[in-house]
Image: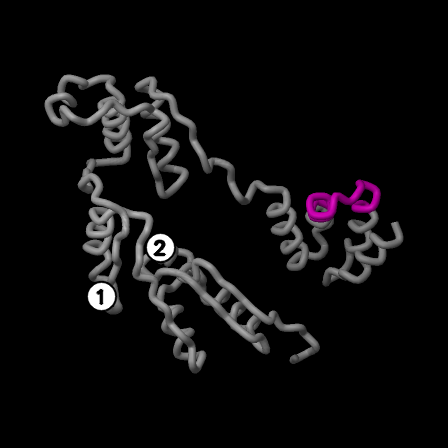
Amino acid sequence: GHTGRKAFRHLLVDEFQDVNALQYQLIRLWNQGGQSLFVIGDPDQSIYGFRGSRSDCFQRLIQEVPGAREIHLEENYRSTPQILCAACQVIEDNPGGPRILHPHCPDGMAVRLVQAPDDFAEGIFIAREISRMSGGVDMLEAQKLERERPVRAFSEIAVLCRTHRQLELVEKCLRHDDIPCLVHGQESFLDAPEVRGLLVFLHTLQVPTDGAALETALHLLWDCPRDLTEIARQACAHQTTLDLDALQQMAAGY
């Protein structure tokens, strides 16, 4: 291959609709000289345009790769016909051909759309709806509306939110109404030691004289002892570029 770089033989990219321009170029470079490239995703689920993703990456790839084969997944085994019908009405105005989805689940409940004036009112509605479903407040009204519907346990009810910020307000409203809840997904990916270490290491590539950042990266990524990180910090304090070979030699000789 070019410049002696070994290419990936087979490359698989999931959630392809979320890639930005730079990530797209990386994928194309990683695939040069490889045997196969497989990307999977849904342009109708592209929601990260605010950070550079573009749903037309599929069409761009088809145009740039002669003989690319496109496979449409039209069988749905997850959602009820009511959910698919509502979803198709939302996305049918997106660019591209008609959306074809064949449901395999039996009929379910009707999809309800509730519009609230603000986030706080939405949280209050969610709390009251759960109370109604679980047989709490407004039980008499619940019996009038749905006499045959069983009372639900809290463990049968889930609230899905798009962002952590929305979760915070929903949790506050639930706890205010004494509704027990267990919040998942609050742990930040960026707080993981490996991620923090990698971000700091990339920072050292831009600012090699930042010895504190280098010391932190060595500790978080490789669990280097304090005396070794101090030596590396002093060695790189006056360099304009980070000497990775020198770091490896110091680590090997330690």
Where residue 143 appears, as percent x and y from the top left, is: 14, 21
In the displayed structure, 39 sits above or below 207; it is: below
- Looking at the rendering, which quadrant does residue 207 occupy? bottom right
Does residue 138 appear left or right of residue 68 in this picture? left
Outermost residue, bottom side: 66
In the displayed structure, 83 sits above or below 26; it is: above
Identify the residue at horizontal 78%, vertical 45% (top origin).
224
Identify the residue at horizontal 56%, vertical 69% (top origin).
10
Tag 2: residue type? Ile
Where residue 137 appears, as percent x and y from the top left, is: 22, 17
3D distance between C-alphas at marks 2 and 1: 20 Å
- Looking at the rendering, which quadrant does residue 2 occupy? bottom right
Report if the CB atoms under discs 2 and 1 are less than 8 Å apart. no
Q: Secondary structure at mark 1?
A: loop
Between 223 and 140, which is closer to the camera in this rendering?
Answer: 140
In the displayed structure, 123 sits above or below 14; it is: above
Label 2: how many Cα within 10 Å (few below 14, some 14–19, many 20+): few
Does residue 226 appear left or right of residue 8 in this picture? right
Task: Please state the extent of the stretch shown in magenta in the rendering.
Answer: 215-230
Q: Is residue 227 magenta?
A: yes
- Looking at the rendering, which quadrant does residue 249 occupy? bottom right
Outermost residue, left side: 144
Magenta part, dominant SS: helix
Q: How is the image coloured?
A: one colour
Foreground tag (2 vs 1): 1
Identify the residue at horizontal 80%, vertical 41% (top origin).
225
The residue identified by callout 1 is 98
The residue identified by callout 2 is 47
